[in-house]
Image: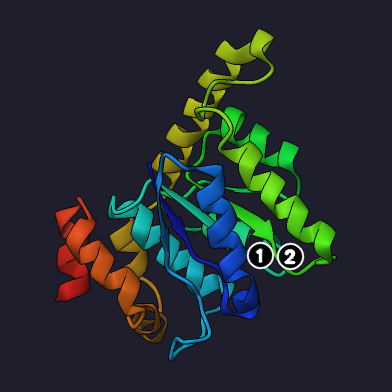
Amino acid sequence: MKIAVIQASSQIEKNRLLFQYTRQAAPDSEVLNFGCTSSEAHSYSYLEISLLAGLLLNSGAVDFVVTGCSSGQGMMLACNSIPGVLCGYAPTPMDAYLFAQINNGNAISVPLGEDYTWQGEENLQKTLKKLFSEPFGQGWPKSQAERKIRDSRLVKEIRRKGQKSYLEFMESLDKGLVEKILRKTDVLEYVKKNGVEEEIRNWITK
């Protein structure tokens, strides 16, 4: 699995922890850090990061995105507005586990600004560890696994039928917003080299 770490600029100081604990939680995966960090020329809101998460996932450059903002809620809602992104909200380890097992999505948003004492850091570490503790999509509770897996597939099918394609969606947005996210060169270069969707690679280079 290829996992991208990318969070809003409002939580730059948490990037190192988010990346570190994701790598620890998923040692057999390739974990890529796309910031945001203090060395970047531009800052990015949770809305702009959700568009970049959509680009990474829809291009096939990565399989999963770990993200967050101050509350985690705004990022989750924004990500779920993007075609091809199914994002859970995980303030606790159990929320992360249930999302992975029942909903089997491709992104998770964690709160990075609420009650962030040492206990907040410990909770983040445990949450990410629980998220990747087992293969995704096994269903839970086990006694109802077959129904849970079937319902998860149906939700994804309904979402696909109710959404535009990622490129149709992006081309319908304000040009200034699109131009802003296309200035995040680390994401763009990675998608150009590793994206499997040729149409999306061509779109970002035109």
**Identity, as a three-letter code, of the amino acid under mark 1:** Gly
| Residue 160 placement: quadrant | top left
Question: Label 2's element?
Answer: loop
Between 24 and 50, the residue placed more toward the observer is 24
Q: Badges 2 and 1: C-beta atoms under 8 Å apart?
A: yes
Image height check: is 131 above or below 90?
A: above
> What residue is disc 1 on?
74
| Residue 153 position within the rendered picture, expressed as x and y whole percent measured from the top left | 47, 27
Q: Is residue 196 visible?
A: yes
Name the front one of labels 2 and 1: 2
The crowding category of the residue bearing disc 2, from other C-alpha atoms within 10 Å (few below 14, some 14 to 19, many at least 20), is some
Q: Within 10 Å of the Cα at label 1, are there few (<14), some (14-19), or many (20+) other Cα atoms?
A: some
Q: Relative to 28, does residue 15 appear above or below in the rendering?
A: below
Looking at the image, residue 33 lies above or below residue 96: below
In the figure, 157 relative to 143: above or below? below
Q: Which residue is rendered at x = 44% and y = 67% of the image?
A: 51
* Residue 41 pos. (x, y %): 43, 91
Instruction: Identify the image quadrant of the N terminus.
Output: top left
Q: Position of residue 130 (x, y in %)?
A: 65, 37
Asked if residue 67 can be seen in this view, the reply is no
Q: Which residue is mark 2?
A: 71
Q: Amino acid at mark 2?
A: Ser
Residue farthest bottom in this picture: 41
* Residue at the image point whose x is 53% and y is 60% from the top: 19
Please tell me whether mark 1 sits on a helix, a strand or a loop: helix
Left or right: where does residue 154 sit relative to residue 174?
right
Q: Of residues 131 and 75, which is closer to you in this image? A: 131
Q: Residue at x 29, y 54 (%)?
A: 61
- Tell me the CA gap for discs 2 and 1: 7 Å
Quadrant of residue 47 in the image?
Answer: bottom right
**Residue 196 percent across, percent down from the top left:** 20, 50
